[in-house]
Amino acid sequence: MDKAYNPKNTEERIYKFWEDGGFFKSSPNPSREKFVVMMPPPNVTGKLHTGHALNFTLQDVFIRFNRMLGKETLWLPGIDHAGIATQSVVERELLKKGIKREELGREKFLEEVWKWKEKYGNTIVNQLKKLGTSADWDRLRFTLDKGYVKAVKEAFVRYYEEGYLYKGERIINWCPHCHTALSDIEVEYIPTKSKLYYIKYPFKDEPDRFVTVATTRPETMLGDTAVAVHPDDERYKNDVGKTLILPIVGREIPIVADEAVDMEFGTGAVKVTPAHSADDFEIAKRHNLPFITVINDRAKMVNVPKEYEGLTAAECREKLAEDLKQKGYLIKVEDYENSVGHCSRCNTVVEPLLSDQWFVRMRELADRAIEAVKKGEVKITPKKWEKVYYDWLENIRDWCVSRQLWWGHRIPVYYCKDCGEMIVSRDEVKKCPKCGSTNIVQEEDVLDTWFSSALWPFATLGWPDETEDLKYYYPTTLLITGYDILFFWVARMIMSGLHFMNEKPFDTVMLHGLVRDEKGRKMSKSLKNIIDPVDVINEYGTDAMRFTLAYLSTVGGQDINLSKDKLTASRNFVNKVWNASRFVIMNLGDFNPFEFDSSSVEYELEDKWFLSKLNGMIDRERNLLAEYDLGQAARELYDFVWKEFCDWYIELAKIRLYGEDKKKKEEAQYLLWFALDKILRMLHPFIPFVTEEIFSYLPHKEKALIVAEFPSSNPDFIDKKTEKDAEYVFSVIRAIRSIKSDFNIPIVHKVGVYFSTKNPEEKALLEKELEKIEKIAFLSNAEITGGKPAKSVKSVVSETAIYVDVASEIDIEKEKARLKKKFDELEKEIKKINGRLSNENYLKKAPKEVVAKDRERLLLLEKERDIVAGHLKDLSE
């Protein structure tokens, strides 16, 4: 083994070894328990970012763990065609060459997109392999491959035949930049400082009377067809049914009563613009009001007085406000903060427009998805997200699934240009079934990307055909994804799975947080705080990045703050594992653990202690990973490996390894091999590359660590009494080391120590383990006495007094002066913090975390002061 671990020389070779060995592959095996994860397909335009790194690390940990448990494990990978995102990227590339999409035409443009996909589409797959993702790459799916297209068509036609899918005019979210409809959850609402305009709407027959209407968008008033008030609003009770004159336009509009009106907003009277508001659309339907479109799909004004024609909505707002003011219609303008819808893709302000689109009726589908979670068929973790899930589904509107794009699943609907017949078909239609005409055209629009993604858990397994894969692998076991696509994707998969398969798509949904910078800020180009995972891998190694992300994960799914310090700590841990393993392997020499009679081992206290701790840790790891709490699993494993194995067990084993007793040496070799073997198996799901490399040097019988069995615990070895006894001995050693450190005596410098205890068990332990304590604590002599030697410094562990002879190692008077100065400094700092904490004003105004830090600091200072005071007393006696 090399002296230092070099990820760059290892990772690519190890990954090739795994792929060549076929260790990622899966096939249906009814005799084995299955564990199935469908990879959330990254966009074909994608490049690895920290969110991917977190998501795929979490998935890979559970995949590797369950593979080692002997389950038939499938991790099915894929790539999403990503309609808007991909089309936009290719359009930009063509524009650099001076070519517009419209000039090419649909077919030629799609040829360019497919070329681009073939050239750049697998970039993210190669980057995912760098992460160590152990997916079955032979099963890689693309959401526009032939089989997937068949599934999408089938879903669309079935929805239509069953009455869930319809085409109609409704208010949709329109992005003027992407030039397509958006579903409700593709709109991001951003708090915006706006203006609230109060406008007079005069009565037709009473010119001196008017209704005041408040609006943030005066430009849409040009399309008003009514003013609505609440039927219980006493202010307008006598005015319902009367006619108003629309300012500037002069159109007559009625006052209608509708319960949807909020009496508390503005003046309680709201303008009704049916063609530009979803709420107004519903009011208009109830009152048979006309629909007038005044903003087109380019966000320009149409069907308005000549002076506003062709203006953008923003330009019209400014001009109209001035005109209303000049003509005496504008009462006042107030500052107002509201949430304005923006396209989640390009950040353009979204326009609500009346448009002819395809919709899926959601109510029945949503109710069934709500029931599945409430009944526990699908478990969402963290549980807090259940309420958010219910709220969204309970208030869901019909889903607009058509998009005015070229790249994507073209809607399988055909129109006869001669008789106007509409045909929804799984197969291409060439002849009209009604009139026999061959003058047929297909629907121009494509489906929302999320429509196809919603079928992912079963379309990837061959649906609508009843394949062996579908029968065996569906429903899947676990879905891991970010909480930000709970609605976009997760809820829709649950609805689709229940509808088309009549069964849930997965048992558990695990939602994780976002990856932020070390200050908790979202990563963005403007803040210049983006951490590129590829750069991290190059600097720290894949295992270090994986372990950091796993270690920082919480069962509550909180966001993760990533920093260089945390990455460095994980790299140090990987190096610690390498160095400890190298020590063990080098000291095995030609020792063969498979030929050693383990039943003949005479266990020392530290062996019994470590085997008890090891078996407890195996149990703990199995339970935590089975409960999907890999963050706690990583943290506890880190502490166990570093503290118990490296700091204590290896150090104690050195006594026998370097001793003259051959039998004891072989026992130590066997136990170190046994311990390291189990530790590597537990660590493998988190840090697969370094553990696989180490395993190749360690005597083993399996083909590879990736397919080795995850350890099982032996309850016979778990002994809490032994653990307590060993911890007592370790505490004694720690106390001696601490006193050496307090007096700046090097740890390896030998000093004399005297013990005094009236506890017979502790005395017996000291007598038995005294030789080890002398060697590990570096003592010149160690005696069990009845009293305190002169000028020695005391520490107490349990009922044992420990006296360290420091007199011969230090200048006592100088040391007393140093300690007195230290004591005074500590007292001063303690007084200062106590002063703050006794100040009521400070406690009220200071942030809670600052006060908590003060209290924590105070406890540490008081503890340190008491130790210094004890040392002063000991040196003065």
Image: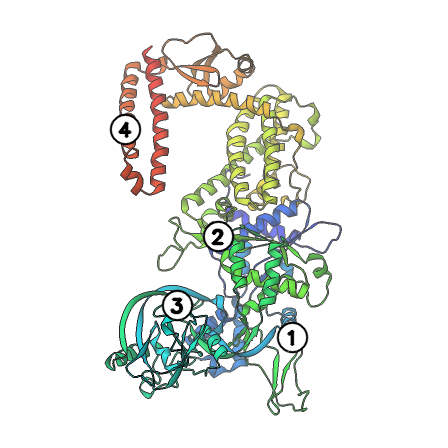
Residue at image coords 54%, 32%: 583
Q: To which quarter of the image does residue 748 belong?
A: top left
Percent x, y for residue 449?
54, 69
Q: Which of marks 1 and 2 is nearer the N terminus?
A: 1
Q: Which of marks 2 and 4 is nearer the N terminus?
A: 2
Side of 791 where 574 appears, left or right: right
User: To which residue does mark 1 refer?
Assistant: 157
Residue 747 appears in the figure: no
User: Disc 1 vs disc 2: Cβ atoms closer than 8 Å?
Assistant: no
SS of the residue at dot 3?
Answer: loop
Residue at image coords 63%, 22%: 603
User: To which residue does mark 4 refer?
Assistant: 831
Q: Earlier in the sequence, mark 1 or mark 3?
A: 1
User: To which residue does mark 2 refer?
Assistant: 513
The outermost residue toward the top is 786
SS of the residue at dot 2?
Answer: loop
- In the picture, which quadrant includes the C terminus? top left
Amino acid at circle 1: Val
Amino acid at circle 3: Met
Amino acid at circle 2: Gly
Percent x, y for residue 40?
56, 59
User: To which residue does mark 3 refer?
Assistant: 263
Query: Rounded to the nearest whole Å, what is the CA distance between mark 2 and mark 4?
Result: 42 Å
Query: Rounded to the nearest whole Å, what is the CA distance between mark 4 and mark 3?
Result: 59 Å
Residue at image coords 59%, 19%: 660
- The residue closer to the viewer here, 392 or 157, is 392
SS of the residue at dot 1?
Answer: helix
Q: In this view, does 418 lie above or below 332?
A: below
Q: Which of marks 3 and 2 is nearer the N terminus?
A: 3
Q: In this view, does 778 lie above or below 112?
A: above
Query: Rounded to the nearest whole Å, what is the CA distance between mark 3 and mark 2?
Result: 39 Å
SS of the residue at dot 4?
Answer: helix
